[in-house]
Amino acid sequence: MASSVDSSIEEILGSFRTIAIVGLSPKPERPSNAVARYMIDAGYTVIPVNPGQNSILDRTCYPSLSSMPPEVAETVEVVNIFRKPADIPPVVDEAIAIGAKAVWMQLGLTNGPAATKAREAGLIVVENRCISVEHQRRLN
């Protein structure tokens, strides 16, 4: 029997196609950049979020989820977070505000109160997993 985490991962990867990556680095050697490139190659739409950049991977980069124009924000289904745990709660608040359907905290990242808040708002939550690793695992 699949765990609830596995069910959540299956739903996210199978149902949603647009991912905002918060904390996406423009540096190719950084994990966030490798994950973004992988997800783009796998057919997902990736929207970079990093306040220090205007463009990453030839895509418009936004300083925050809340700074996205409505026509962009309303397309975001998954908010993939590459930020330290203390920075996660405001990202979750923004994800809820823009109507995202899921929050994914990358490998090594968890924030219990933020996860609870997201779940209470109706979002699917995955913590401490790598979205590209989980995608690869489901291909085999």
Image (cartoon, grey):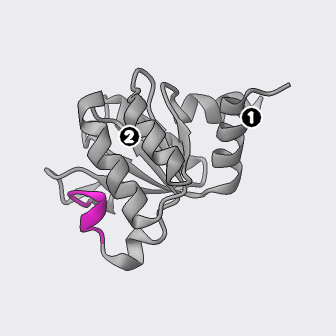
Q: Quadrant of the C terminus?
A: top right
Residue occupied by mark 1: 139
What amino acid is found at the position of numbered circle 2 in the picture? Ile
Please, which residue is most extreme toward the left here? Answer: 52
Residue in the image at 24% along x and 37% along y:
87
Q: Secondary structure at mark 1?
A: helix
Please, which residue is most extreme toward the bottom here? Answer: 71
Badge 1: how crowded within 10 Å, few (<14), some, or many (20+)?
few
Residue 123 location (% of width, % of height) = 54, 51
Residue in the image at 33% along x and 59% along y:
58
Residue occupied by mark 2: 81
Task: Specify the quadrant of the image occupied by residue 70.
Answer: bottom left
Q: Earlier in the sequence, mark 1 or mark 2?
A: 2
The nearer-to-camera label among 1 and 2 is 2
Residue 32 falls inside the magenta stretch: no
In front of the other: 30 or 107: 107
Task: Specify the quadrant of the image occupied by residue 109.
Answer: top left
Disc ID at residue 9: none
Q: Is residue 83 above or below residue 65?
A: above
Which residue range is magenta in the image?
Answer: 62-68
Residue 61 location (% of width, % of height) = 27, 59
Asked whether, in this view, residue 121 is left or right of residue 91, the answer is right
Residue 42 location (% of width, % of height) = 60, 47
In front of the other: 130 or 136: 130
